[in-house]
Amino acid sequence: MNQKEDPPAPATNTDPDIARYLNVRSAAFPAFIGNDRLAFLTDVTGLPQLWQTRLPGPDQEPHWPDQLTFADDRVLGVWSPPEADRRSLIFTRDSGGNENGQLWHMDPDSGAERCLTRGFDEAMHIFGCWSADGRHYLFSANRRHPGLFDLYRGSLDGPAEMVWQNDRPGFIYHVAWSAGGHRAILSLMHSSFDCSLLEIDLPSGSARRLNPPDIVARYVKPFFISDGRLLLVTDLNRDFMYLAYLDLDSMAFQELVALDWDVHLTALSPDRRWLAYTVNKDGHTELRLRDLADGREQAADLRPAPGVVGMMDWHLTFSPNSRRLAFSYTAGIRTSDCYIWSLHPPAVSAVPLLVTRSSHAGLDPATFTRPSLIHYPTFDQDDHGQARQIPAWLYSGSLDPDRPRPVVVLVHGGPEAQFQPYFNPLVQYLSAQGYALLAPNVRGSTGYGKDATATWTTSKSAWTQSTIWPTLSTGCAGNRASTAGGSPSPVPVTAALWSWPPWPSILICGPPASTSSASATSSPSWKTPATIAAPIAKPSTAGWIATGSSCSAFHPSTMSTRWRPPSSSFTVQMIPVCPWVKPSSWSRH
């Protein structure tokens, strides 16, 4: 008699592979459609596309969203007009990831879309702003020459016309349009920390410089408070970015909000009553709402914390009736989503409403590792004779100094940039595999004042000694740490490989200026995206990791990638990783 065998137990996914983490989705770039709908971008289909949802009323759950765009290329951004009755959207879309954004008009009611910049496919178009009546818009483009951006005025009913010809290299950003439609304010970027603030007379095409010509400073996010007064963010004569008024007649700047941290994003409500702004406080974000009538402020209760507002879009926006503020937010343990902050004076709620609910690919957010802010001493002293402290974000879970864990030191790119506590799927995957991760904001990082950032350019010869060496030598033993990075960080990472031979390094993919240092090349473009379908070795075995702009992870046994376009190729030099760390001198905050 044959005994019936029990069926095998169903498989359980207790150890998700990296593909699961790389399929975590996100939402960002909110834009109001009237006062009752919200457009936004999400990559739920695998590619960022434009969606919309009806906003819920009090005590209601958000509605299921509708997809608006379906092309084979990504959508880069979306903007809606200030008039509630003008239910229109302008969005940008590039081709094959070439970053040459084209402007498109969308009717969100019918779904009809049309290209506004047809015939200029080789030019990059940067949206500026809508006119007050929602019938026209300003944008910049490099149609005449790849290195020169001019200002254009477009119409939903006809072709665009150039309104200011620019003969200096640099991007045009942060465009504001006066209520009367005759003047525009813009920032012409010369470098990361130097720009000109210009007033353009649209009928004549003449330009007037509004900033002192002999002082290097930034001028961003201008808004017209009245026809002769601006509100903007600048670091003129200060170390940090601050909010200021500018009188267009006297050319005098007046401080409004000046802190020992950078003011970053801003938005002015259509009724000119509310000013929303963010503060970059040691890498994480505070979102504040200021009543310009009486100066009172309230901070949003952002959860979970720490996190970053506008990480993916650098964008805040008010509804046409000035009663709601929309923004995106991501945290170290939560992907980016769109939120609504309802403004009902005098009692403004401190807790924003989550509107989108992006998928974490079936992963339990409770298992993600929350980053902690730490500081560690470097070799030199500050102005007060104390050991200079370097801030860093530590993904570790619980650390036991007597049981050291493997560590990966993440060196951010830029170099004028900053590591912030956003959701990074590769970081969470490595943490789940048993690695601790340390992301220092070394000298040259932004967010700590322009003097601190300037150490990258003024002390290049001592840069690696003053940044990467203290990072690697603090709390580490022998060859039990590894380094990783992107953009220009292959320079210090490769320097670590040469100067500290026992310490293995992680290969970096970055832009052409740095790929030779990292022994990595990508053709025809380093910006080509890749989908990674291979696991990373666990800490118990020797493995290889590559991370950066063009790839996320490799394993030597399964170098499986899918590139778009298929003709591109990728060459890497794999470096073994088997690190450990002992965090004896880190101070946690």
Image (tube, helix red, strand yellow):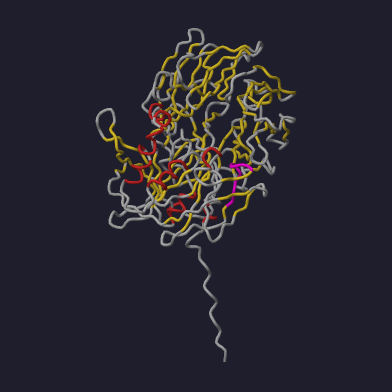
- Can residue 303 be seen at all in this image of the molecule? no
Percent x, y of residue 91: 65, 33
User: 535 left or right of 131?
Assistant: left
**Quadrant of the drawing holding the N terminus:** bottom right
- Which residue is situated farthest in the left direction here? 385
- Can residue 421 be seen at all in this image of the molecule? yes
Nearest the viewer among 109 and 463 is 463
Residue at (46, 35) in percent of width and height: 415
Q: Quadrant of residue 183?
A: top right
Percent x, y of residue 119: 75, 30
Percent x, y of residue 73: 67, 42
User: 405 left or right of 164?
Assistant: left
- Which residue is situated farthest in the top direction here? 250
Vertically, is 38 above or below 248?
A: below
Percent x, y of residue 219: 49, 21
Q: Quadrant of residue 138?
A: top right
Vertically, is 381 above or below 422?
A: above
What range of the chain is rendered magenta? 524-531
The secondary structure that most of the magenta stretch takes on is: loop
Residue at (40, 54) in percent of width and height: 435
